[in-house]
Amino acid sequence: LMLRDVLRDFDVPDVAGALAPRPLPVLNPTDALTKKMTREAALEALKPASSAFQGQVNSRALEIEVFPVEEETVNRLLEWLARS
């Protein structure tokens, strides 16, 4: 699914929250300057999205993970796709 130009009108947390309750992995998030975020910073930035996932049947559908090595990110994404 591709939503062309969606970020012209909405912020990432809004779009992510709109996907609830569908599973959403957020792997190695970056900030607006494309600097890699810590998990804690990503949790803070995605608070609006995480509130949309709370209380859902699958409340753990929003997964935020930060990996030190890109290869781990690819492996995690492949695992997630295999489960879906």
Image: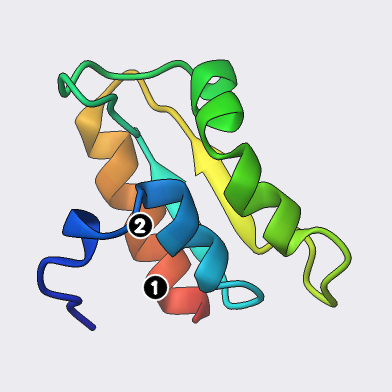
Q: Position of residue 46 (x, y in %)?
A: 54, 39
Left or right: 72, with 16 as reference point: left
Q: Nearer the viewer, residue 36 or 18?
A: 18
Q: Of the numbered discs in the image, which one, if any, rests on residue 50? A: none
Q: Rounded to the nearest whole Å, what is the CA distance between mark 1 and mark 2?
A: 6 Å
| Crowd around label 2: few <14 · some 14–19 · many ≥20 (10 Å) | some
Q: Position of residue 40 (x, y in %)?
A: 59, 18
Left or right: 39, with 31 as reference point: right
Indicate the quadrant containing the N terminus: top left, top right, bottom left or bottom right.
bottom left
What residue do we see at 37% from left, 19% from top?
A: 37
**In this rendering, is residue 29 above or below 21?**
above
- Residue located beneath label 2 in the image: 77
Q: Amino acid at mark 2?
A: Leu
What residue do we see at 32% from left, 50% from top?
A: 75
**In this rendering, is residue 28 above or below 36?**
below
What residue do we see at 42% from left, 62% from top?
A: 15
**In this rendering, is residue 33 above or below 5?**
above
Kindly state the secondary structure of the residue where label 1 is placed: helix
Q: Position of residue 70 (x, y in %)?
A: 22, 32
Circles 1 and 2, Cβ within 8 Å, touching? The answer is: yes
Name the residue at the front extreme.
9
Q: Amino acid at mark 1?
A: Leu
- Residue located beneath label 1 in the image: 81
Q: Quadrant of residue 20?
A: bottom right
**In this rendering, is residue 14 above or below 47?**
below
Left or right: 65, with 21 as reference point: left
Q: What colour scheme does the image use? A: rainbow
